[in-house]
């Protein structure tokens, strides 16, 4: 396989699907990258298993001989894997992929070691790593080692590898950098180092090498560069501020590193305090663009390539390792493309490498991009912040795609279960009563979805106006915040949805009479004034009961009436469990967002009753749906077949588990509670509809 003109690698964490990671490694190899580096993600997956799978896939794909695409363990440590075991691992890997294996050794994360009860002390950790390097080399040379227990035979290695396996040091403390200069084949820098900090580290590496009588040029130097690619730099920065891993990395930056990059540790301390409180929204809002620019590669693929060049030329990083914040196909594709751009850049001759690299890339991209023009500054970014290249104005096709994406995002289609399931329930009851008509049913379904759509959009408009939603909000739509859609365009879209709902209502009025007027007005006014003044039900602790009424009894009973022209007590009974789960979707959202709502001066029901009661109220709503179903069946209001809805119990167990973790203060556990509850509502409601329809099937003995 051909190689890029300048070496660059890909760094991945041992997480996600092994098959995907193997595929990405082959993709990187085919694109000419130098290597792939996989590091342990404690309590997730095992890096050695991933590396073994990659090596085997490369072997089966015809990789032979030395000097080609390398596979690196970056990094392992002697605290969780004894050096003898590491030596055995390296030998086995070299047999699979001869001459292509690299092993980076460090101490492991002290916090994770302590969590596992493994002793850690800074002084002994240095000696442990140094001794591990010596042990690995002795064993790989086939030398005997004295037994650690007196009186026992020495360790006789039976596995010396055929090829030399380079050993790199992976650590950031100055003593470890010195150790790397003294005896390692390379140095692996951790993620989130600034150019200034990395320059100082590599200078110390050179000094240590010279003092040890070594040529610094013989020591390989690589480092993980956290990367996040999007269509513009602005969107990449906004996305980064919403990622818990990025927030964590910004919360553990060292004092010296921060000062070298021009930041005060007090900023890090405030981010760390919010992180420890699991207030990721607040922590992300504290991160300025400049901090991300110093420690990450954020932007378009061109931005990433230019910043990688800056790390190479200004800090002396010989092998940049692009490490995606998000391990997914799109990010890997973009980083592989960025690697090719990086390899084609001219070598900058001055300390202004980043600026020159950006100019070169901008010229190369001129044929495929429009005139450069920064996007408007939006919430969550530092005013006046600039990057290596300005955000580019998108072409017509991209603009249309962004607009369609903005409409999709602001509509929040994942929540449509809240309007579709009640209509399906009412329609199923009408079908069982043998009084079903397709046209009014479709009209009721369309009207319900349109009202829901308009409500979602108006809700976002006023949440943004009041400062409840910001660019770092975990589950909010960001269509307005990203300036993908203006507030005026959002209002036009919302009013269009409401207007179409009215048109549908006129048809139903002509069909069923004036009773539809009351149902329609309740839907339109309830939806619009849910967050809009002067009523603002959501902000006055009335959101949950209003949603229960509108998307429970009103929609189920209203649909039955629209389809049949009659009222039904059975429909009212069926609406209760459906409405309780819809209310639970909103209640889970309000419970999770108590901090943000309170800071914005918003008084939701959860904010008024407090976290403890909000937790119990949420659990009561989801359990109440099942209790209500059982009660209505026991009384005879619903047929026994509807008990098929209890097949959704695994989804109930999931949300209850998340809720219990959230009640202990683990905010991350309820970050997706609204989506999880919507999934429960969809499953429960769909099964309820199936049960209703099954009740009409005659049983034959």
Image (cartoon, rainbow, N blue to C red):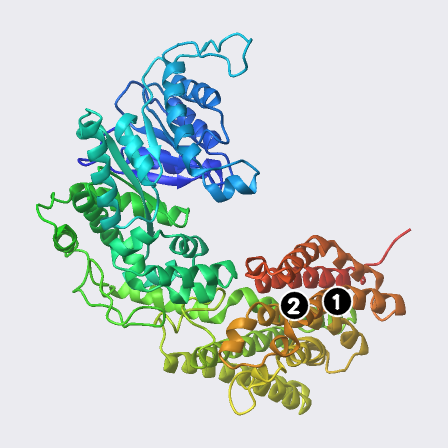
Q: Is residue 209 left or right of residue 540?
A: left
| Residue 483 at x, y percent in the picture | 34, 72
Query: Which residue is found at the position 33% from the left and 35% from the top?
Result: 176
Measured along the vertical axis of the image, is residue 104 above or below residue 272? above
Q: CA distance from mark 1 to mark 2?
A: 14 Å
Residue drawn at the location 41% of the way across and 35% of the way down: 123
Q: Position of residue 180 (x, y in %)?
A: 29, 31
In the picture, which quadrant includes the N terminus? top left
**Residue assigned mark 2:** 421
Q: In what element is the residue under mark 2?
A: helix
Q: Residues within 10 Å of mark 1 (few under 14, many from 20)?
A: many
| Residue bearing mark 1 | 625
| Secondary structure state at the residue bearing disc 1 | helix
Residue 563, horizontal then vertical, whole percent: 69, 77
Residue at 39 percent of width and 9 percent of height:
142
Instruction: Answer with mark 1 or mark 2, whichever residue precedes in sequence.
Output: 2
Mark 2 nearby-residue class (10 Å; few <14, some 14–19, many ≥20): many
Instruction: Locate residue 88, reporting x and y percent.
Output: 46, 19
């Amino acid at each position: 396989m051909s190689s890029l003109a300048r070496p660059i690698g890909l760094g991945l964490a041992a997480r996600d699907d092994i098959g995907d990671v193997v595929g990405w490694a082959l993709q990187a190899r085919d694109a000419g990258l130098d290597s792939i580096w996989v590091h342990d993600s404690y309590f997730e997956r095992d890096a050695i298993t991933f590396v073994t799978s990659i090596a085997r896939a490369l072997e089966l794909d015809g990789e032979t001989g030395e000097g080609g695409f390398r596979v690196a363990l970056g990094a392992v440590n002697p605290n969780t894997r004894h050096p003898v075991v590491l030596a055995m691992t390296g030998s086995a890997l070299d047999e699979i992929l001869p001459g292509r294996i690299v092993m980076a050794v460090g101490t492991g994360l002290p916090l994770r070691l302590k969590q596992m009860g493994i002793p850690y002390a800074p002084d002994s950790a240095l000696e442990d790593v140094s001794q591990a390097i010596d042990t690995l080399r002795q064993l790989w040379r086939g030398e005997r080692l004295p037994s650690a227990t007196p009186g026992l035979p020495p360790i006789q290695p039976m596995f010396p590898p055929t090829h030399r396996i380079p050993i790199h040091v992976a650590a950031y403390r100055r003593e470890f950098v010195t150790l790397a200069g003294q005896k390692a084949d390379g140095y692996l820098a951790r993620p989130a180092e600034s150019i200034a900090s990395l320059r100082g580290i590599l200078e110390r590496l050179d000094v240590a090498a010279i003092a040890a009588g070594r040529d610094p040029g013989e020591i390989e130097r690589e480092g993980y560069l956290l990367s996040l690619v999007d269509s513009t730099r602005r969107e990449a920065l906004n996305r980064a501020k919403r990622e818990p891993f990025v927030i964590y990395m910004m919360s553990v930056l060292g004092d010296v590193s921060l000062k070298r990059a021009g930041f005060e540790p007090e900023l890090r301390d405030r981010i760390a305090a919010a992180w420890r409180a699991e207030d990721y929204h607040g922590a992300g809002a504290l991160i300025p663009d400049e901090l991300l620019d110093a420690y990450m590669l954020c932007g378009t693929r061109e931005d990433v390539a230019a910043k990688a060049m800056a790390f190479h030329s200004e800090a002396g990083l010989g092998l940049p390792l692009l490490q995606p914040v998000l391990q997914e196909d799109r990010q890997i594709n973009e980083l592989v493309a960025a690697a090719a751009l990086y390899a084609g850049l001219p070598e900058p001759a001055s300390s202004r490498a980043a600026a020159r690299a950006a100019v070169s890339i901008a010229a190369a991209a001129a044929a495929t991009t429009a005139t450069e023009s920064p996007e408007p500054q939006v919430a969550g970014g530092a005013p006046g912040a600039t990057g290596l290249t300005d955000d580019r104005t998108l072409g017509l096709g991209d603009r249309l795609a962004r607009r369609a994406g903005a409409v999709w995002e602001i509509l929040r289609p994942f929540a449509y279960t809240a309007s579709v399931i009640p209509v399906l329930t009412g329609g199923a009851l009408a079908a069982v009563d043998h009084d079903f008509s397709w046209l009014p049913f479709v009209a009721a379904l369309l009207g319900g979805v349109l009202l829901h759509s308009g409500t979602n959009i108006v809700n976002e408009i006023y949440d943004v106006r009041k400062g409840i939603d910001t660019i770092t909000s975990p589950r909010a739509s960001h269509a307005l915040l990203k300036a993908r859609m203006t507030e005026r365009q959002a209002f036009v879209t919302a009013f269009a949805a409401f207007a179409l709902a009215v048109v549908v209502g006129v048809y139903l009025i002509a069909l069923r009479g004036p009773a539809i007027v009351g149902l329609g007005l309740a839907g339109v006014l309830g939806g619009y004034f849910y967050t809009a003044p002067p009523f603002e039900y959501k902000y006055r602790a009335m959101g949950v009961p209003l949603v229960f009424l509108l998307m429970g009894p009103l929609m189920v009973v209203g649909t039955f009436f629209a389809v049949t022209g009659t009222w039904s007590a059975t429909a009212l009974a069926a609406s209760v469990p459906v409405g309780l789960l819809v209310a639970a979707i909103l209640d889970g959202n309000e419970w999770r967002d108590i901090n943000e709502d309170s800071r914005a001066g918003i008084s939701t029901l959860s904010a008024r009753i407090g976290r403890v009661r909000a937790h119990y109220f949420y659990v009561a709503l989801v359990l109440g749906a099942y209790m209500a179903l059982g009660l209505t069946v026991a009384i005879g209001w619903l047929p026994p077949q509807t008990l098929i809805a209890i097949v959704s119990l695994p989804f109930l167990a999931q949300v209850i588990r998340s809720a219990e973790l959230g009640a202990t203060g683990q905010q991350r556990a309820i970050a997706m509670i609204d989506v999880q509850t919507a999934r429960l509502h969809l499953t429960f409601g769909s099964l309820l509809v199936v049960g209703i329809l099954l009740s009409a099937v005659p049983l034959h003995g």
